[in-house]
Amino acid sequence: MRGNYRGYRMLLVHAHPDDETINNGATMAMYAALGAEVTLITCTRGEEGEVLIPELAHLAANQSDALGPHREIELADAMRALGVSDHRFLGTESLKFRDSGMMGTEPNNRPDVFWQAQVDSAADLLVTVIDEIKPHVLITYDEFGGYGHPDHIQAHRVAMRASEKSEWQIPKIYWNVMPKSVIQSGIDAMKKVGSDFMGVESADELPFAKDDSFVHALIDGNKYVDKKMDAMRAHATQISVDGPFFALSDNVGLQIWGNEYYTLVRGAKAEPIDEQGRETDLFAGIAL
């Protein structure tokens, strides 16, 4: 890793508030702390999310439908925790994309949801950002959106289309990936303390678990995992950090959150490379 990343620019495209912290919180905190310019684009305000705090249950979409504005506040608090000052929602004051909900649910049919957006039109909005900030690295989901959520799939489509349409050609593009070996370690550790991991026995049962061969880069963000945990706490309506997964005696839970994994889909792999052939710096090979 370089000691200073001033002048390097990273763009992340995510579907809902909290996705960025879960997938890339340590990466964002690390590069921001080292001087890189980190920009987050969030495509929706997560209006259809479940509300984990009983006293805020009235915000849910099937009640007052006021969760979106509340999650805007949570996102701002999370970005402060990560040290990221440039975070924006895709769209304009007059054009805002709504959370589509899970695949096959009624919200998918609303004309204002992100899933119903015309990909090229939404991509044009992102092109404006790309041509403004000229990122060296773009991070988003794979073609399945990680686990099949409509907004994640759409975010992938929009981000990749925008990268094709923009005048600025982004040198390196990465997709988030969670390797099976890491997930299996979490499952096994949870079993030892008498708990479970999403109710499964094997990583093979989880749609977002991918073969380790998809891991082309590993960012060791363990020095910044406390910032990631603070950001996760900021997303209080969506994430509970008080469960057994975060309290394992050997800190396996925190180790899993501190390491973040990526598949390189544009650009060449470059040194530094670890013993397993994975990049350890997403800006590797990029000269200013």
Image (cartoon, helix red, strand yellow):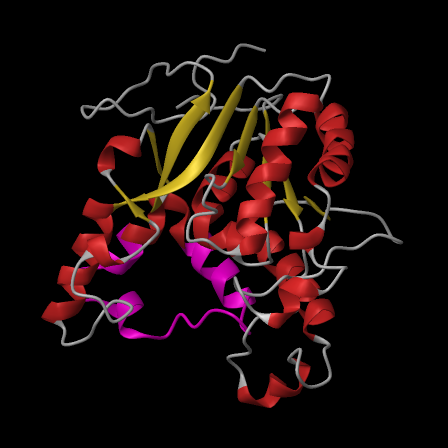
**In the depicted structure, whether residue 118 falls above or below residue 183:** above
Q: Is residue 48 visible?
A: no
Q: Which residues are magenta?
A: 226-255
**In the depicted structure, whether residue 266 falls above or below residue 26:** above
Q: Most extreme residue toward the left, as rendered?
A: 192
Q: Position of residue 230 (x, y in %)?
A: 49, 61
Q: Position of residue 195 (x, y in %)?
A: 19, 75
Q: Nearer the viewer, residue 130 or 145?
A: 145
**Magenta-drawn stretch contains 232:** yes
Q: If the image is split into quadrants, where does the N terminus sit?
A: top left
**In the depicted structure, whether residue 140 falls above or below residue 282:** below
> Is residue 124 toward the left or the right of residue 161 in the image?
right
> Is residue 142 toward the left or the right of residue 178 in the image?
right
**Magenta-drawn stretch contains 241:** yes
Q: If the image is split into quadrants, where does the C terminus sit?
A: top right
Q: Nearer the viewer, residue 173 or 148?
A: 148
Q: Residue at x 43, y 73 (%)?
A: 240
Q: Nearer the viewer, residue 160 or 170?
A: 160
Q: Residue at x 55, y 78 (%)?
A: 51
